[in-house]
Amino acid sequence: MSRFIDPTTDFGFKKLFGDEANKDITMGFLTDVLEPPTPLVDISFLDKEQLPATVEGRAGVYDLFCRDVAGNHFIVEMQKSRVAFLKERLLYYATFPIAAQAWKGKLAYYDPPFMGPKYVRETATATYGRREAVAPVWDYSLSPIFCIAVLDYVLDGSKNAVNRSSLRYEDSSCEPYYEKLRFITLELPLFDEQKVGYDPERRINKWLFFLNYLAELDHIPARFQHDEIFLKAFRVAELANLTRADRWQYELSLKRVRDLEAALHTSYTRGKNEGKNEGKIEEGRAMLHLLFSQKLGALPEDIAVTIHAIDNIEPIRQIMANFIKINDWEALREYLPLPSNGNSAAFAH
């Protein structure tokens, strides 16, 4: 029995990093992943479902979405199983907080002497005493957005457990086009404590160890013993500290993971078997063509086409079992699948 929850499950990740009561853990994690010049001061959790501008549009749903007091936005995704087009997915998700920063709202009323440079007087504005209706001017200034993906698999071509990138030109000698949109991936399987230069005390490495091995630990390792953020994370993750409701949600989360893994394994096994079966069918079709061309001469066009279209191993087996008795093309046609139904064979013997 594990002592701690698995932080890569949906429940485990959100319990540790998406709970208001554990905001300090989230801030510590973001600070250590991003390694900014100064630590984050405070964050607020935002609605994780970003609605589209139209009914027909697609919504963006994040595992974690928050903003700090400086206006920086943070999108965090935990992906346990491989998904297609992950980079495009993160870029798409980033468009929601970008679009949300455009000014929206009703006109506000300000005393003319106190109008700042970001406000303009409307051309046809109504005046109420000394107060006039004004509309804000948005100059397209955007706050930074950081998209972080914690992956329990390796992206094609990745070599490092931590990868940071921004929008940049193909030519690496050029400056990045836009620095306020950053993408960070933590690819857990690439975490290697034996790697040359590995520093166990570096905080990002502590998080990689924590995320990789928490569910397997039965004690708190020495490297975490004097770190308040990690000590709290261990307390939150301890199964014995979960409420009955949380324990139930965690078990459901584990079940979803196991069901998904079982489904993927079944799909893989089936695909592998079907691949083997397809190979046998191809060999069988070639063998029929060779044997009957040697026995009866050049194959008539309709028989050659029918043999090429066989997609089931059973007709091939039946024909091979009766090969000695088939001495003309009409006899062979009786064993071939009917043209009207390539999956059904009419066997005369």
Image (cartoon, rainbow, N blue to C red):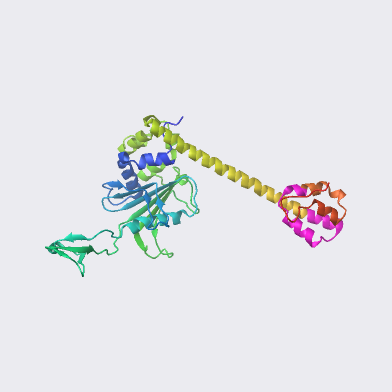
Span of residues in magenta? 288-316
Q: Position of residue 317 (x, y in %)?
A: 77, 47
Residue located at (84% from left, 56% from top): 329
Which of 239/173 is in front? 239
What secondary structure predominates along the stretch shown in magenta?
helix
Quadrant in the rendering for residue 242? top left
Q: Tell me if residue 314 is in the magenta stretch.
A: yes
**Residue 250 picture location, percent across and down:** 43, 36
Answer left or right for 279 relative to 109.
right
303 or 264: nearer the viewer: 303
How many numbered markers are drawn? 0
x and y, in percent, of residue 112 in the image:
14, 64
**Where, by quadrant of the figure, is residue 244 drawn?**
top left
Task: Tell whether 307 sits left or right of 271.
Answer: right
Could you tell me if residue 32 is visible in this image?
yes
Residue 162 on the magenta segment: no
Taking the spot 83% from the left edge, 55% from the top edge, the residue there is 292
Q: Residue drawn 83% across and 53% down?
A: 332
Residue 318: percent from left, percent from top: 79, 47
Asked if 231 appears above or below 95 in the picture, the reply is: above
Q: Can I make out residue 201 in this image?
A: no
Q: Left or right: where does residue 183 sit relative to residue 266?
A: left
Residue furthest to the bottom in view is 123
Q: Nearer the viewer, residue 348 or 233?
A: 348
